[in-house]
Amino acid sequence: MIKKIKKNIPGYLFVLPFLIFFILFKIYPIFNAVYISFFNLKYEKGDWAGIQNYIHIFKDPLFLKALGNTFYFVVILVPLTLIVSFILAQLIFRRSNRLQNFFRAAFYLPIVISGVVISILWLYLLHPIIGLINYVLSIFHIPGVAWLGNTHTALPVLALIVLTWFIGGNIIIFLASLGNIPVTYYEAADLDGASGLRKIFSITLPLLKPTSLYILITTSVGTLQIFEVVRLMTGGGPAQTTTTVMYLIYNTAFFYGKFGLASAMGVVLAIIAVIIAVLQFKFLSTDVEY
């Protein structure tokens, strides 16, 4: 055992810098957040609170509303992202290599561009007076809408915007997985006279289960952490209809200085993310490998 460790010392030394940063900036903050959540901590002063912070947040109507808004994003965006990404990947995969490269770049662009830039662009497009979308509606004599100022439209519009951010990376992943499926499967299906839909449901989707599971889990975790688009475009309004748990954590910690309460919210959100990921992995995991 000792000889094996000595033999691998160069490898351990290469990994050590990353391991140190991982512990300092990933592991330590997690345990510190859990520790702080049991204190009534405001800025630098605080005393032991036990589970009072957790009791308080579950009695807080604003936190429950934010939790509902966050689940709305999960329920709407996760299946929609998976379906739209798969359909677009299927359409792109059938094109020539040149067109595939073009669409890969086009759909991946929102991921590369800063979220701040994209949010500002959408703010101009959705502006109730000078926005391009309302201008197009006016051409057809349709009255304009205050998309981000209406309690009925603000949350669905934000979900649509986030969808445009999420599908790019997932399309790339689906395209890579589609390229790994052996062509012989489709050739055998052609000989049997299988239709296009039959090949999708009997060959493509079963073999893409590992990829679909990965996208489901990462998208679910990503939607639970939606913050940027809310902070920049609506500020949680109107009437807290777009306030998410992450945005509420930000306000609670950095506007009101209630770090213990914010940490408790963060711990609850992390537990929810873990539960969702475990359930998805348990019920959707597969032994298919290729």
Image (spheres, rainbow, N blue to C red):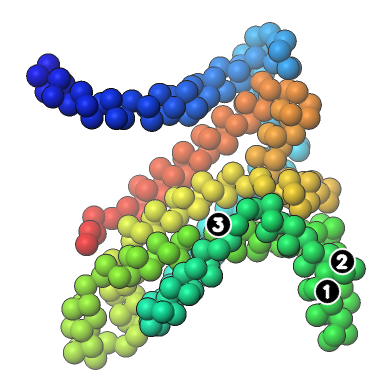
How far apart marks 1 and 2 lie (CA) works out to 7 Å
Q: Is residue 1 visible?
A: no
Is disc 3 surrounded by few (<14), some (14 to 19) or many (20+) residues within 10 Å?
A: few
Quarter of the image for the N terminus: give it: top left
Is disc 2 surrounded by few (<14), some (14 to 19) or many (20+) residues within 10 Å?
A: some
Q: Is residue 39 left or right of residue 121?
A: left
How far apart marks 2 and 3 lie (CA) works out to 28 Å
**SS class, disc 1:** helix
The label nearer to you, 3 versus 1, is: 3
Name the residue rendered at 67%, 28% in the picture.
262
**Which label sits on residue 214?**
none
Q: Quadrant of residue 35?
A: top right
**SS class, disc 2:** loop
Front-lying residue, 2 or 98? 98
Q: Give the amino acid type for the residue marked by disc 3 in the picture.
A: Val
Q: Is residue 106 above or below residue 273?
A: below
Q: Which residue is mark 2?
A: 128
Q: Quadrant of residue 254?
A: top right
Q: Which residue is mark 1?
A: 134
Mark closer to the chain start, 2 or 3: 3
Residue 234, position as x, y percentages in the image? 78, 51
Asked if labels 2 and 1 touch by Cβ distance under 8 angstroms, the answer is: yes
Residue 4, position as x, y percentages in the image? 11, 23
Residue 253, position as x, y percentages in the image? 71, 28
